[in-house]
Image (spheres, rainbow, N blue to C red):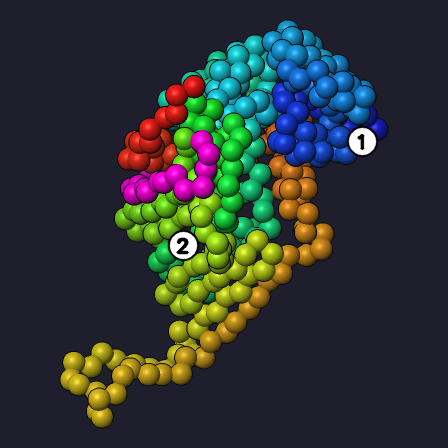
Amino acid sequence: MADSAGGRVIRVGILGQGRSGYSIHCAHLKTDPKYRITAVVDPLEERRTNAAAEFGCRVHADYRDLLGRDDLDLVVNATPSHLHVPVTIDLLSHGINVVCEKPLARRAADVDAMILAGRASGTLFTVFQQSRYAPYFAKVREVIDSGVLGRVVMIKCSFNGFARRWDWQTLQENNGGNLLNTGPHPLDQALQLFGPAMPHVTCFMDRANTFGDAEDFVKLILSGHGRPVIDLEISSCDAYPLHTYHVHGTLGGLTGSTSELKWKYYKPDEAPAQQLLREPLPKQAYCSEQLPLHEETWTVSSAQSGLFQTMSEAFYGDLYRSLTEGAPLVIKPERIRQQIAVIEECHRQCPLSRLEP
């Protein structure tokens, strides 16, 4: 690691200059004084030329040119999804610290192999699950953890919209589809709220507006003893998308989007005293009372309004502490294994036919 006036500088190689590699990782790292983009890999010559000019770094067409170099502290694997597993294992086996983009893998056994490769070489291995740092998700967790909603019975989460798609991420052969493309973000959040135990999985998948052979509609129910029911939707055929989060609790509930949340609840010591009645109520009445409800709201601050920037800054800040101070990883691949196991079970329950090449 190079030295700078502000401390250690992490020298980074970035594999891929597509939407994730360039627009997310490079966009943050080129402005972060704790990191320096030292190498970029991309098979397209135009992208390599642009990277060399913009970042002043070495460029390569093949990631294997980075193996054995002594001027890299970290490599970001933002290759196409189906290459995440073999490329990450190769990098880890050569003693290189790795941040792998999502989806981490298609099968839990592949995650085990990556974890084993990292342990064997003593390298750091984490996953770019940056949405765990999303301000709205942090607030949802805060409200739930405060207990004001009581026992949480169900959490509905929807990342829906109406769109058609026809790129490489619509193909099963590329580990495409809504569950592997978008799903790692809401599913990671949902599993943080569910807990570390493997849930019971019920899944429905369909192809609606896609031009490929992977799903673009997902309905996923996660359940388990003593845990809230998780109702997750990732749909490309929802013309009227509603709330990102909707929480049902015994004392109240929460609803809202990535920019605004509201929740209301009652306090048991302020509620009217009631008791169970087995006899019919007088005058054919229905149970009725005036619960004193408290309502609160949250709106994303202007400093947090750039969602990708906010999440990337938090992720790479924690990663820097892990690399330079030995702080525990926040995003542990062992926990992401649970996510991939759920995704694998979804595909087992909902096999889809494939397009011929």
Q: Which numbered circle lies on residue 72?
A: none
Q: Number of marks in the image? A: 2
Q: In the rendered structure, which amino acid carries the disc numbered 1? A: Gly
Q: Indicate the secondary structure of the residue bearing disc 1.
A: loop
Q: Quick check: 262 above or below 186?
A: below
* Residue with the mark numbered 1: 6
Q: Quadrant of residue 65?
A: top right
Q: Quick check: 345 above or below 187?
A: above
Packing grade of label 2 (10 A; few <14, some 14-19, many >=20) is many
Magenta-colored span: 196-212
Q: Indicate the secondary structure of the residue bearing disc 2.
A: strand
* Residue with the mark numbered 2: 155
Q: In the picture provided, is 76 more to the left or to the right than 347? A: right
> Residue at position x 16%, y 80% from top?
278
Residue 205 belongs to magenta span: yes
Q: Quadrant of residue 292?
A: bottom left
